[in-house]
């Protein structure tokens, strides 16, 4: 499934054409990380530079039910932590988090 033209226009207007890519070479590079999982190419790759851009992108994606996968060099955790903080400010989506029985 290709990215909707409306979303591609939104991203290009927000970030500029030099920070949005649908080129196959770029999609292939971002299709996998350092884990053992099989590659899964994205439909678009964007390079955000600040929290405001990330917030606008995530808001747009949420309103249209578009899945978003943060990627930071394929192995860096620092940016992933920042994105998680934006997506999950209450810290409830942690791997292995145990909740008391309700």
Image (cartoon, rainbow, N blue to C red):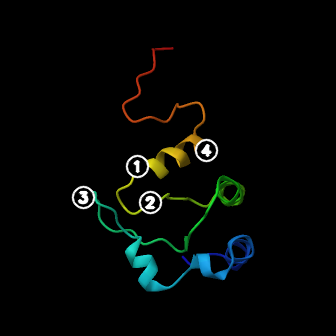
x%, y% of residue 87? 59, 44
* Residue mark closest to the camera, 4 vs 3: 4
Q: Which mark is residue 46?
A: none
Classify mark 2: helix, strand or loop: loop
Tell me if label 1 and label 2 are in contact, CB under 8 Å. yes
Pick whichever of labels 4 and 2 is earlier in the sequence.
2
Pick whichever of labels 4 and 3 is earlier in the sequence.
3
Q: Is residue 83 toward the left or the right of residue 78 in the image?
A: right
Crowdedness of circle 2 by 10 Å Cα count: few (<14), some, many (20+)?
some
Pick whichever of labels 2 and 3 is earlier in the sequence.
3
* Circle 4 residue: 86
Tell me if label 2 and label 3 are in contact, CB under 8 Å. no
Farthest residue toward the left? 36
Q: From the viewer's perspective, is residue 35 above or below residue 28?
A: above
Q: Which mark is residue 72?
A: 2
* Residue at 69 percent of width and 80 percent of height: 5
Q: Is residue 29 toward the left or the right of residue 93 in the image?
A: left
Q: CA distance from mark 1 to mark 4?
A: 14 Å
Classify mark 1: helix, strand or loop: loop
x%, y% of residue 57? 67, 60
* Residue at 56 percent of width and 41 percent of height: 85
- The quarter holding residue 35 reads bottom left
* Circle 3 residue: 36
Q: CA distance from mark 4 to mark 2?
A: 15 Å
- The quarter holding residue 11 reads bottom right
Classify mark 3: helix, strand or loop: loop
Q: Quadrant of the N terminus?
A: bottom right
* Circle 1 residue: 77
* Residue mark closest to the camera, 1 vs 3: 1
Q: CA distance from mark 4 to mark 3?
A: 26 Å
Q: Is residue 18 toward the left or the right of residue 74 in the image?
A: right
């Amino acid at each position: 499934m290709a990215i909707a033209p409306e979303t591609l226009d939104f991203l290009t207007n927000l970030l500029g054409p030099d920070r949005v890519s649908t080129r196959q070479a770029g999609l292939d590079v971002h299709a996998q990380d350092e884990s053992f999982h099989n590659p899964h190419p994205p439909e678009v790759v964007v390079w955000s530079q600040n929290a405001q851009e990330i917030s606008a992108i995530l808001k747009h994606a949420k309103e249209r039910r578009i899945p978003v996968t943060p990627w930071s060099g394929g192995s860096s955790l620092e940016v992933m932590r920042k994105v998680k903080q934006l997506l999950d400010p209450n810290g409830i989506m942690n791997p292995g988090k145990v909740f008391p029985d309700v």
